[in-house]
């Protein structure tokens, strides 16, 4: 039997009782405001034990920025190879372990990571950035001219998916099909989608890439699938399965989190017109604004590890083989690191947001994701004088992903906007 945390204390006003909250249950996030709960955890139970249920194990919950960073950094005492999110950690492992970058450790991880970083670095991404700009501006311009749209479906769903598909060389005709699978694979836009359907969607994505990898082996192009298919790790060419698993992780990682960050940026800016004005008037830099958008959105709420040996965190003993979850959502709101964390402040500097993780597994797509979010903010700044909700925003139901799957918005066009000439502006 596990000890409860050794550090306990009073609950913050309005906080749910940590001993009854189950962070593995998507309903916890859909049905409750957890602001006070997280504050209680950070203040009084920084190393909290989420109790087991009849059907699954318990796990540790880290909520402070410092502790989350420490475990991210420590790949001696913690492994990603038994899963890095609750769904796989609780199932006892990840089918991609040792082959898919995010769930591989050690020298193999380093070699695979180098291959991907080469394809996702600033120089290689220059043409990709130009395409992101053109696509984003065209989508925003059209939506603004139309007056209202569902921002989540009509704009945000079409930026990251197109970008990662361009990188991988996914034909345009297949993109809507893959987008639908992505939305079912990890989270649920629809309360009726169950785990079985999600698992089927994940399988379909793998099958889809299997065919594409075979094709690229026969006729390589300039795309990332071709690069992976002809790369070697430990002196051996990557197998079809290795390539497929990494494509899977890129299409999921490259689409969902960036899409949710963009949706959250519009939701938060509509709710805080004074921050929108600071962006519109050029009072805050776009890079600074992007970091605050990422902090606020915290699109992947947690990641996780398994302890390889007994280890102490903040006076609490974590046993070998225990699951330790790292809550970025809470770390991004830690009062010990962020001044008035509840305030959405586009000029926040410094901003040690941890949405991309930290250390050896730091997100390889961070640079690309930042390009996508900044291009969105620039397009909004150039083509609209503002925007407001045009209907209820609908939340995802997930223990991993945070955000909205539908966001109806009404745009107010900026008459000066269309005068901008995209071709003349340099890509940053
Ligand atoms: C890793 C978040 C966009 C591909 C990670 C990790 C986080 C993260 C937190 C670390 C996971 C861990 O420590 O276990 C995000 C967020 C994004 C984003 C918030 C957007 C706002 C992207 C994009 C791509 C991508 C655009 C692909 C182009 C990956 C991959 C890894 C990763 C392959 C594994 C890295 C490794 O294990 O070395 N991401 N990501 N991500 N991300 Fe992202």
Image: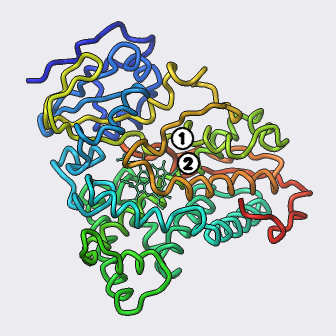
Q: Quadrant of residue 341?
A: top right
Q: Residue at x 69, y 57 (%)?
A: 375
Q: Quadrant of residue 26?
A: top left
Q: CA distance from mark 2 to mark 1?
A: 6 Å
In the rendered structure, the answer to whether residue 273 lies left or right of residue 209 reads: right
| Image location (x, y in percent) of residue 296 | 56, 36
Classify mark 2 as within 8 Å of ligand 1 or not, answering yes or no: yes
Q: Quadrant of residue 7?
A: top left
Against 15, residue 150 (above or below) is: below
**Closer to the camera, 157 or 363?**
363
In the rendered structure, the answer to whether residue 312 lies left or right of residue 180 reads: left
Task: Work out whether mark 2 precedes mark 1 in sequence or the reverse, and give the earlier one.
Answer: 2
Q: Which residue is mark 1?
A: 297
| Image location (x, y in percent) of residue 250 | 41, 64
**Circle 1 SS class:** helix
Q: Residue furthest front?
A: 235
Q: Which residue is mark 2?
A: 261
Against 278, residue 361 (above or below) is: below
């Amino acid at each position: 039997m596990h000890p409860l945390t050794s550090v306990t204390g009073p609950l913050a006003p309005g906080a749910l009782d940590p001993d009854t909250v189950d962070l593995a249950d998507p309903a916890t996030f859909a049905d409750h405001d957890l602001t006070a709960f997280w504050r209680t955890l950070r203040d009084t139970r920084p190393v909290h034990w989420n109790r087991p249920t009849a059907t699954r194990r318990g796990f540790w919950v880290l909520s402070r920025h410092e502790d989350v960073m420490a475990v991210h950094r420590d790949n001696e005492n913690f492994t990603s190879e038994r899963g890095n999110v609750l769904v796989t950690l609780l199932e006892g492992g990840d089918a991609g372990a040792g082959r898919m970058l995010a769930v591989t450790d050690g020298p193999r991880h380093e070699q695979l990571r180098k291959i991907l970083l080469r394809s996702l670095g600033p120089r290689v991404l220059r043409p990709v950035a130009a395409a992101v700009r053109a696509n984003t501006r065209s989508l925003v311009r059209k939506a603004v001219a139309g007056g209202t749209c569902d921002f989540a479906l009509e704009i945000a769903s079409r930026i990251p998916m197109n970008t990662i598909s361009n990188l991988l060389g996914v034909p345009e005709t297949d993109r809507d099909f893959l987008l639908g699978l992505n939305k079912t694979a990890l989270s649920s836009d629809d309360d009726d989608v169950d785990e079985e359907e999600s698992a089927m969607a994940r399988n379909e994505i793998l099958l889809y890439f299997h065919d594409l990898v075979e094709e690229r082996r026969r006729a390589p192009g300039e795309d990332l699938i071709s690069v992976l298919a002809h790369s070697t790790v430990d002196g051996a060419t990557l197998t079809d399965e290795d390539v497929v698993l990494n494509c899977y992780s890129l299409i999921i990682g490259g689409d969902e989190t960036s899409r949710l960050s963009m949706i959250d940026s519009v939701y938060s800016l509509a709710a805080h017109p004074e921050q929108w004005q600071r962006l519109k008037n050029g009072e805050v830099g776009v890079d600074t604004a992007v970091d605050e958008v990422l902090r606020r959105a915290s699109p992947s709420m947690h990641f996780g590890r398994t302890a390889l040996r007994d280890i102490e965190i903040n006076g609490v003993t974590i046993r070998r083989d225990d699951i330790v979850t790292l809550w970025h959502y809470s770390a991004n709101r830690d009062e010990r690191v962020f001044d008035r964390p509840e305030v959405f402040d586009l000029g926040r500097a410094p901003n040690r947001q941890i949405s991309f993780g930290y250390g050896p597994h730091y997100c390889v797509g961070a640079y690309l994701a930042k390009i996508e979010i900044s291009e969105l903010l620039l397009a909004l700044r150039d083509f609209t004088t503002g925007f407001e909700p045009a209907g209820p925003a609908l939340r995802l139901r997930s223990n991993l992903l945070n955000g909205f799957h539908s966001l109806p918005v009404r745009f107010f066009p900026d008459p000066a906007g269309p005068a901008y000439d995209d071709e003349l502006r340099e890509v940053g």
